[in-house]
Each structure stands twice: as structure tokens, then as C-alpha cells.
């Protein structure tokens, strides 16, 4: 049984990827310091698949603690999710983001220097592109000056990965996610935003559940068909499965170079108003929203060219926007039941 380390494995995308790994008969070890997740996710994973993965509560940005954790381990692969990811917070507290996101990567990658057979998957983001000149966005699209410290940490981490992969002859893949949404169809795991959600879909589901007030639609004066901004919303289960396919490419030594980069999206753009309409159809709920001013730092439109993932990884998204919104709503209602029990 191949042994895979999932850093940030109790987080939103991490936990869904852990489930997919277990279902594909991998032995999963989780390293997560609970800075943006909850220990209860372990039980949730166990509820879904009957296996409770080994979990280490370790701050990977602490070099000594990370080295102590890694030194006696024998991993066949590492999927590195552990990072802070709130764009707005990164603007207010850039050093927290540079320190955590860069040091965690550097410390985890130090293991690869002495174990370069170990496959390495890096959680990157479409944020690295900023507002692309041309759409859909390909992996060769220009990497513009980052719009936030968070986006800059992803760009810098990719540079670290590129140069280290060449220098140490590694096997690595960076996956540039577009907008992950939704939850596991079981309704037993999903997104657990801390505080008021910054992202669109968790705000929508909490608003529909009566936890939050009306949704603010940040601007309807964008140069798009309905004036609201466009994003490529990908179901988190499709995204998790892309990680398994990328991992197996490396475990089977199929990679064409020490580092490969893939966009992971649906290839389809949806506006904020279209997401609202799709949510109302998926949930049967009427959503209360109002149009407000634009949110600083937001771009007009981003959606992926998924040719490379389709042709090289043989992966493409299967679930629709409506599937994701249905699953997100089921998860929100389950959370509500748990809280009232
Ligand atoms: C989507 C759209 C908002 C909230 C962020 C990160 C990105 C990635 C995904 C990690 C935008 C609008 C939102 C609201 C709204 N995360 N919106 N009202 O900003 O595209 O991407 O999450 O990698 O790095 O930047 O996602 O969900 O915040 O916004 O109108 O209350 O919804 O303006 O057009 P975003 P989002």
C-alpha cells in the first residue's frame, strides 16, 4: 500500500482529497496544525469511508518541528495543501502569509532533497494569473504581478518548486485550481469557513440558511454579459480526483519533466448572477441579495483552458455547477441539523 502525506489534510480540499486517496487504497498520513480546520473532520472522514487516517498536529512552518516529523517517515508521495488562503487577510497581514506559506513549502520540500523518488503535488491557484489578457486562460498565460500577498505566495512557491525540481531532479506537479465549490455528496464533509465567509458559495448557503443576511453582489458594472464578475467554479470532488490522477502520473514515472503545471477548472465561466440563479434552482430556495460596489482586488473574468489536463492527465470535470450547489446546500443543511442537535 503506497503511503501518502497530505499536508492540510483536514482542510476543505485536503479532506476531500484524503477521502479519494483512501477509496483508491492509499495509506494516508495527515499533517495539519488546525490553523484553518477542525479535528472533527477526522471523524467525518471516518464516517464516510470507515477509516480514520493517522493525523499529526504539526506546524510545518516551524523548521525543527517539521524536520522532527518528517525525519523517520517513508512517503511515496506528498500532496501539499497546507497554506493560508484568504486574499483579504493576506493584504492586512502579509508577513503571516509569506512566513507560513513559503516556510511550510520549503520545510516540506527539504524532505524531497533526500527522498527524490517521492512524488510531490503542489496546491497552486488561478490567482497566479491575475486578470489574464486572453480567455480561456492557458498554463502559458502571462503570470502578472500578484494582486495580493496570498497570490504572490503562490507565485513564489511555484518558482521555488520549479527551481528545486530541476536542481534535485524531483517528480512534481503544480495544480492551478480555479474556484473550488460544493461538498461531498454524502453531506458528511464540506467547507467549514471560519467566521463570515469571504467566498461566494459558502456566503450564499449561509444566507439561504438564515445564518447571514442578504448576499452582497460585489458590482454589476463589469464588462460581462450581465455586469457581474465571471469565475470557473469547479466541484471540490472533481478537484480532489484530479489530485489522484496527477499523483499516479508521478508514481508511475510518466511525468515529462521534473515539474509539470496544469489548470484544474471546468473550462466554463459563470457570473455571480448565474450562480445565484443556479443555486435557487438547485435548492428551491429564493436567495435574498443586493447589488453593491465592487470588492477591491477582484478581477472581471477568469475561466480555464483545460486542454492540458484533458490531453495529458486524461482528466476533466464531470460535475456541473448545479451539482456543486446542490451538494453545498445539502452540507449546509446537515451542519444546521448538527448544530441544533
Ligand atoms: C467569486 C466571485 C466576487 C463573495 C478566491 C481566491 C482564489 C481562490 C478562490 C484559493 C467574485 C463575488 C464573492 C460575496 C460576491 N482561493 N462575490 N459576494 O475571489 O474569485 O477567488 O477564492 O486559491 O485564490 O482569490 O472567489 O468566491 O471570493 O468570489 O459578489 O459575498 O463572487 O466578487 O466575483 P475569488 P470568491
Image (cartoon, grey):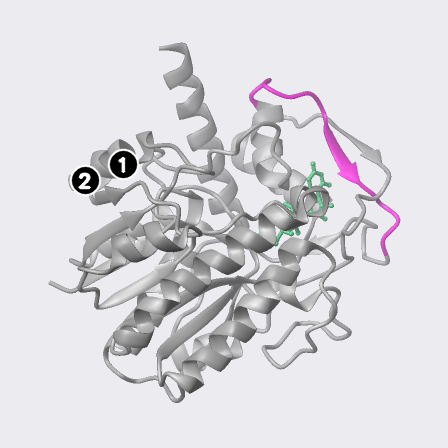
* Residue toward you, 211 or 81: 81
* Labelled pair 2, 1 in contact (Cβ < 8 Å): yes
Q: Quadrant of residue 246?
A: bottom left
Please tell me whether residue 68 is drawn above or below residue 2 in the rendered image: above
Highlighted range, magenta: 209-222
The residue pinned by badge 1 equals 42
* Residue toward you, 303 or 111: 111
Q: Position of residue 121 (x, y in %)?
A: 38, 67
Q: Secondary structure at mark 2?
A: loop
Position of 87 compared to 263: left or right? right
Q: Report if residue 217 lies within the magenta region.
A: yes
Q: Residues within 10 Å of mark 1 (few under 14, many from 20)?
A: some
| Residue ID at (44%, 78%) | 164
Q: Report if residue 333 lies within the magenta region.
A: no
Position of 286 compared to 299: left or right? left
Q: Quadrant of residue 137?
A: bottom right
Position of 185 compared to 92: left or right? left
Is the residue at mark 2 in contact range of ligand 1, meaning its CB lies under 8 Å from it?
no
Q: Residues within 10 Å of mark 2 (few under 14, many from 20)?
A: some
Mark 2 vs mark 1: which is more N-terminal?
A: 1
- Visible residue check, residue 146: yes
Please identify the residue farthest to the front as the structure is shown.
64
Q: Which mark is residue 245?
A: none
Q: Which mark is residue 52?
A: 2
Q: Position of residue 310 (x, y in %)?
A: 45, 76
Amino acid at each position: 500500500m503506497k503511503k501518502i502525506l497530505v499536508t492540510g489534510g483536514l482542510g476543505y480540499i485536503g479532506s476531500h482529497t484524503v477521502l479519494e486517496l483512501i477509496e483508491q487504497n492509499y495509506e494516508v498520513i495527515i499533517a495539519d496544525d488546525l490553523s484553518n480546520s477542525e479535528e472533527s473532520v477526522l471523524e467525518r472522514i471516518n464516517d464516510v469511508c470507515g477509516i480514520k487516517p493517522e493525523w499529526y498536529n504539526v506546524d510545518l512552518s516551524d523548521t525543527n518541528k517539521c524536520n522532527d516529523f518528517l525525519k523517520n517517515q517513508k512517503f511515496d508521495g506528498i500532496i501539499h495543501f497546507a497554506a493560508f488562503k484568504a486574499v483579504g487577510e493576506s493584504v492586512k497581514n502579509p508577513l503571516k502569509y509569506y512566513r507560513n506559506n513559503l516556510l511550510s513549502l520549503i520545510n516540506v520540500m527539504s524532505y524531497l532533497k533526500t527522498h527524490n523518488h517521492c512524488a510531490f503535488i503542489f496546491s497552486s491557484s488561478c490567482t497566479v494569473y491575475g486578470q489574464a489578457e486572453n480567455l480561456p486562460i492557458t498554463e502559458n498565460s502571462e503570470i502578472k504581478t500578484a494582486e495580493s500577498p496570498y497570490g504572490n505566495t503562490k507565485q513564489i512557491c511555484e518558482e521555488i518548486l520549479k527551481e528545486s525540481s530541476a536542481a534535485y531532479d524531483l517528480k512534481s506537479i503544480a495544480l492551478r485550481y480555479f474556484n473550488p465549490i460544493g461538498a461531498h455528496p454524502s453531506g458528511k464533509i464540506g467547507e467549514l469557513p471560519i467566521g463570515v465567509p469571504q467566498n461566494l458559495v459558502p456566503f450564499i448557503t449561509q444566507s439561504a440558511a438564515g445564518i447571514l443576511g442578504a448576499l452582497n453582489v460585489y458590482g454589476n458594472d463589469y464588462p460581462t454579459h450581465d455586469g457581474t464578475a465571471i469565475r470557473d467554479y469547479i466541484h471540490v470532488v472533481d478537484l480532489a480526483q484530479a489530485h489522484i490522477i496527477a499523483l499516479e502520473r508521478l508514481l508511475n514515472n510518466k511525468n515529462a519533466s521534473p515539474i509539470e503545471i496544469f489548470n484544474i477548472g471546468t473550462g466554463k465561466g459563470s457570473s455571480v448572477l448565474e450562480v445565484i440563479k443556479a443555486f435557487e434552482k438547485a435548492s428551491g430556495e429564493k436567495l435574498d441579495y443586493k447589488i453593491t460596489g465592487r470588492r477591491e482586488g477582484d478581477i472581471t473574468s477568469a475561466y480555464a483552458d483545460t486542454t492540458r489536463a484533458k490531453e495529458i492527465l486524461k482528466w476533466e470535470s464531470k460535475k456541473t455547477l448545479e451539482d456543486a450547489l446542490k451538494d453545498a446546500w445539502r452540507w449546509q443543511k446537515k451542519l444546521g441539523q448538527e448544530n441544533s442537535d
